[in-house]
Amino acid sequence: MDQPKIDDTQSIFLPVSSGFPVITEEKPTMRGWLHAGILPIVIAGGVLLIVLGQGSAAKVAGSIFLASSFLLFGNSALYHRFNWKPKTKLVLKRIDHANIFLLIAGSYTPITMLALPFEKGLILLIAIWSMTLIGISFRIFWITAPRWLYVPIYVGMGWGALVYIQDFMAANLPMMVLILSGGLAYTIGALVYGFKWPNPSKKHFGFHEIFHALTVAAFLSHWTAALLIGLAPLPGSFAG
């Protein structure tokens, strides 16, 4: 007999040790394909950030951006494309949600290290990675938290750069425009995910696929911003 599948929205409320499957509908046919498709671009783009980065700080920042992006899109593709056994699915889901915090921090790292004076960059870098560690613990140890509670945390972290918006604009205006554009895409995606709307096709391309499409758009925007500042780091930043 075929094993029942787990519901994406309900399985998060079960502990990993439960092992009880929840009957659900088939996944939309496009579920996970967007993140699987962007993965080769993530790898190639990350390598470019490292190779083209001016100075060791830019290369380190590019490496962190690559690692966080690869973890999110790689695990997401793995998690969403296949039907897993209950315990495995719940573990992958926890990793998937925790990786969102990692991607936010990884996206922040190049701009905090390369586009701000050292002291300000250090403050924002410590703040964002501290929030990331708290967020990851939050998603691992309180997996039953409702969406309305943890989605705003993602959004709040994503807009943390506004604290130093004048510094960022002075350092590289096109970079700042790209950061804001990516942040807007992430925010719209979070709202779509939180409200599960719009949901054009439950069979092929639903609200979750729209959310994934917006994360891809945001990633590309932030990658371009990281490349711009990596090519010309601010004097007095981590780059020296």
Image (cartoon, helix red, strand yellow):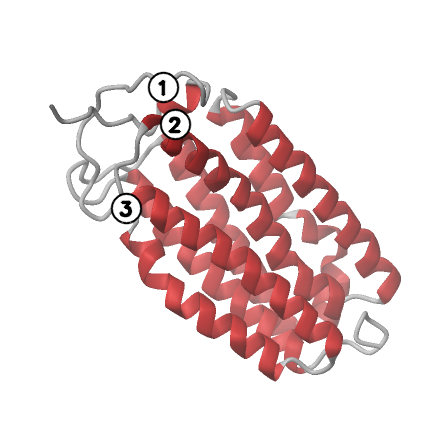
Residue at the disc numbered 3: 81
Name which quarter of the figure residue 198 lies in.
Answer: top left
Instruction: Name the kind of residue labelled 3 in the image.
Output: Arg
Q: Where the N terminus falls, by quadrant?
A: top left
The residue that label 2 is drawn on is 87
- Above or below for 212 versus 11: below
Which quarter of the picture shows residue 139?
A: top right
Q: Residue furthest front?
A: 1
Q: Is residue 67 above or below residue 155?
A: below
Pick whichever of labels 2 and 3 is earlier in the sequence: 3
Q: Does dot 3 land on a helix, a strand or a loop?
A: helix
Residue 4: x %, y % from top left? 20, 24
Q: In 3D space, how far apart are the residues under numbered discs 2 and 1 (Cα atoms)? A: 6 Å
* Image marks 2 and 3: residues in contact by CB distance under 8 Å: no
Looking at the image, can residue 76 be seen?
Answer: yes
Task: Identify whether 23 is placed above or below 103.
Answer: above
Residue at label 1?
19
Quick one: quadrant of the C terminus?
bottom right
What is the secondary structure assignment of the residue under circle 2?
helix
Query: Type of residue at label 1?
Result: Gly
The 10 Å Cα crowd at callout 1, few under 14, some 14 to 19, many 20 or more, is few
Q: Nearer the viewer, residue 177 or 47?
A: 47
**Which comes sooner in the sequence, label 2 or label 1?**
1
Distance from disc 2 to disc 3, alpha carbons, whole Å, reads 16 Å
Instruction: Please tell me how crowded label 2 is: few (under 14), some (14-19), or many (20+) other residues with Cα within 10 Å.
Output: some
Where is residue 218? Give x, y as percent: 47, 57
Lower sequence index among marks 3 and 1: 1
Q: Which amino acid lies under the numbered mark 2 shown in the image of this protein?
A: Lys
Residue 228 marker: none
